[in-house]
Structure formats: structure tokens, C-alpha cells
Image (spheres, helix red, strand yellow):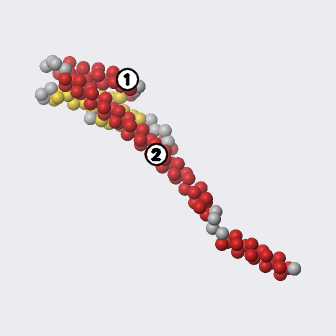
Amino acid sequence: MRHAVRLHLDTICNRFRKDRSGQFSLAAVAAMPMLLVATGIAVDLAGQSNKRFELQNIMDSAVLAGAALDTDSDAARKREARNVFEGALVGAGINVAAVTADFDILDDNVVNGAARMDVALSFAKMIYPNSAHVRVE
């Protein structure tokens, strides 16, 4: 009887040792936190890129409006570019105070502009606690 129980127990242990069906779930559980962090960083980078494209479009429309103004006054061109820029920011739902913008007038009525803003991070805060910077020219 004792020998039969031992033989049965050895058979069960051998089957358990050879069974590999649960190994994938163990690997998936181990990899899940890294996948979640990587997904969160990707979402934050996509949001940052979206804000940069949006800010670039606003800056482009502002400098074109300043350059298209029919005047020889550099101050009027800068003012027009700034007014269009701030109006487009408000239209896009971006806080005007959160964006720093500078406009310069180059020769031949060329308006040059640069803007910078901070974009709040959602998921990457765990790794990088500051906000991300977006700059366009």
C-alpha cells in the first residue's frame, strides 16, 4: 500500500513538473507594469506632439497675418501677429498666459515668431514629475 501511494505521488509530481501551460501567464503578469508604463509614456508623447502641431499652426497663421498687413510699420506688424496669435490661442482653448511668444520683423516684411509652452503630463509624471516643454518657431 505504501509503495502504491508513493508511486501515485511520484506520478503526480512528475506531471506537475513537466506541465508548462501556466508559464505564459506568469510572464504576462511580470511584463504588465512595464507595458502599462510604456503605454502611458506613448500617450503623453502623443499629447505633447499634438500640442506642438497645434501651436505651430497658430504661430504660422500669426506670422502670415503680420506679414500680410499692408503697412510699413514694424510695430503694427508685430501687434497684428500677436493679436492673431492670442485670438487663435483663445479659440483653441489654450490659456494665453501659459504661452510665451516673441515676434521679430526681419527685412522685406518678413515676420518671425517663436513660442513656448508647458504641456502637463498625465502618465509620465511617475518618471518625470515636471511638465514637458513645447517650442515652435
Q: Toward which corner of the image does residue 105 lie, by quadrant?
A: top left
Q: Which residue is mark 2?
A: 41
Taking the spot 30% from the left edge, 24% from the top edge, the residue there is: 85
Q: Quadrant of the N terminus?
A: bottom right
Number of callouts: 2
Disc with the residue nearer the chain's start (2 vs 1): 2
Q: Is residue 33 left or right of residue 78?
A: right
Residue 78 coordinates in the image, percent (x, y): 22, 22
- Residue placed farthest to the right in the image? 1
Question: The residue under label 1 is which amino acid type?
Answer: Gly
Residue 57 coordinates in the image, percent (x, y): 31, 32
What is the distance, in whole Å, between disc 2 and disc 1 at their CAs?
Answer: 28 Å
Residue 104 in view of the camera: no
Q: Which residue is mark 1?
A: 91
Taking the spot 36% from the left edge, 25% from the top edge, the residue there is: 89
Q: Is residue 135 left or right of residue 20?
A: left
Q: Quadrant of the C terminus?
A: top left
Answer above or below: position of 45 versus 106: below
Give the secondary structure at mark 2. helix
Q: Toward which corner of the image does residue 30 lie, by quadrant?
A: bottom right
Residue 33 coordinates in the image, percent (x, y): 55, 51
Answer above or below: position of 41 versus 63: below
Q: Residues within 10 Å of mark 2 (few under 14, many from 20)?
A: many
Q: Residues within 10 Å of mark 1 (few under 14, many from 20)?
A: few
Task: State the residue in front, 124 or 21.
Answer: 21
Answer above or below: position of 6 versus 49: below
Residue 81 in view of the camera: yes
Q: Is residue 60 left or right of residue 41?
A: left
Taking the spot 35% from the left edge, 36% from the top edge, the residue there is: 52
Comparing marks 2 and 1, which lies closer to the viewer?
1
Taking the spot 15% from the left edge, 18% from the top edge, the residue there is: 71
